[in-house]
Image: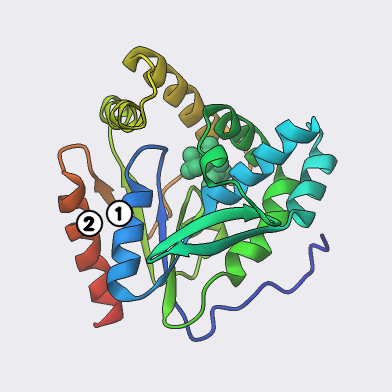
Amino acid sequence: MDMEETLPAKGDRVIIAVDGPAGAGKGAVCRAVAERFGLAYLETGAIYRAVGLLALRQGVSDEAGLAELARTMPFSFRSVGPGRFGAYLGEEEVTAQLREEAVGEAASKAAALPEVRRALLHFQRGYGGPPGVILDGRDVGTVVWPEADLKIFLTASLEERAKRRALELREKGETASLEEIRQRMAERDARDSSRTHAPLLPATDAVTLDTTPLTLDESIARVTLLVASVLHP
Ligand code: DC
C-alpha cells in the first residue's frame, strides 16, 4: 500500500478508542456501550484474526505475503440478527473460527509485522459513520486514532483475565487448564507488548480502567459514564 495514501478523516464522528490486553473485557464492554449510545463498534482484533486464519489456511508466513492477504482479503461484518454481527470472508461466515486459539496465535504473529499493520489501517479508519464509533484493540488510541475524542485503557491482572477466559471456554463446553490459559496469555501479552511496531501501550492521554475488582456490569457502567461525558458534555 502506498504510504502516502490519504487515510479517512475523522469528519463528523465521535471516536472512542479502547485498548488493552486480551481478556480485559474490551469486547463485552464496548459492545454494550456502543449499543446503548447507538454507536458503531469495531473489534479490530477480528481483522488481525482474519489475516491469521487466511495465513494458516494458505500457509503464508512471510511479511510481504501476509501484507498482501491483509490488503486483499474480502473481510466484512454483516448483521446476523438483532444487534448481532458476524465476521465474513467473502460469503463465508468465519465468526467462530476467528475465536480459535491457533488463529489468535497466528494473528498475534502477523500483527507484529509493520506492513500488515499498515495494510489494515485504512479499514479501521474508514469504519463506522456518524454519530460515531467505538474501536477496541491494542493501538487504537496510539496509532489508528491518535485524535480520538476519548481513549480508555482497559486492563486487568493476568490471573483475573485467565480466570475469565477459562470460564468462557467452560461455557462453550471446551476445557483447558487455568495454568495453560495463563501461560498462553502471558506469552501473547509479551509478544503484543514487546514488538517494536505499535506495541500494546496506553496512550499518554488515556484513562486507565483496571477491571480486576469489577464485575462486567460495573465495567460497563464506568465506561458508560466516560462515553456519556464526551457525547453530552
Ligand atoms: O484482541 P484479540 O485477542 O482478538 O487480538 C488478536 C491479536 O491481534 C492480538 O494478539 C494482537 C493483535 N491485535 C493487534 O496487534 N492490534 C489490534 N488493534 C488488535 C489486535
Above or below, 176 relative to 74: above
- Residue 29 tag number: 1
Ligand 1 has an atom within 8 Å of the beta carbon of the residue at disc 2: no
Of callouts 2 and 1, which one flags the residue occurring earlier in the amino acid sequence?
Answer: 1
Occupied quadrant, residue 220: bottom left
Q: CA distance from mark 2 to mark 1?
A: 5 Å
Rendering colour mode: rainbow
Instruction: Tell me the quadrant of the picture where the N terminus can be found.
Output: bottom right
Ligand 1 lies under 8 Å from the Cβ of mark 1: no
Residue 165 sits above or below residue 150 on the image: above
Reading the image, the residue beneath label 2 is 220
- Check the picture and name the quadrant holding the C terminus: bottom left
In the rendering, at what x and y percent does residue 110 appear? 68, 37
Amino acid under disc 1: Val
Q: Residue at x 23, y 65 (%)?
A: 224
Where residue 232 appears, x then y in whole percent? Answer: 25, 82
Regarding mark 1 in the picture, which secondary structure is present there?
Answer: helix
The answer to which of 91 and 6 lies nearer the viewer is 91
Residue at the image point whose x is 56% and y is 53% from the top: 87
Q: Amino acid at mark 2?
A: Ile
Instruction: Tell me if residue 77 can be seen.
Output: yes
Q: Position of residue 123 (x, y in %)?
A: 64, 64
Residue at the (56%, 57%) spot, across then down: 143
Residue 199 seen from this side: no
Q: Which is nearer the eye, 157 or 196?
A: 157
- Residue at disc 2, secondary structure: helix
Q: Are marks 2 and 1 in contact (CB under 8 Å)?
A: yes
Q: Position of residue 203 (x, y in %)?
A: 43, 54
Number of numbered discs on residues:
2
User: Residue at horizontal 56%, vertical 41%?
Assistant: 98
In the depicted view, which residue is nearer to us: 46 or 173?
Answer: 173
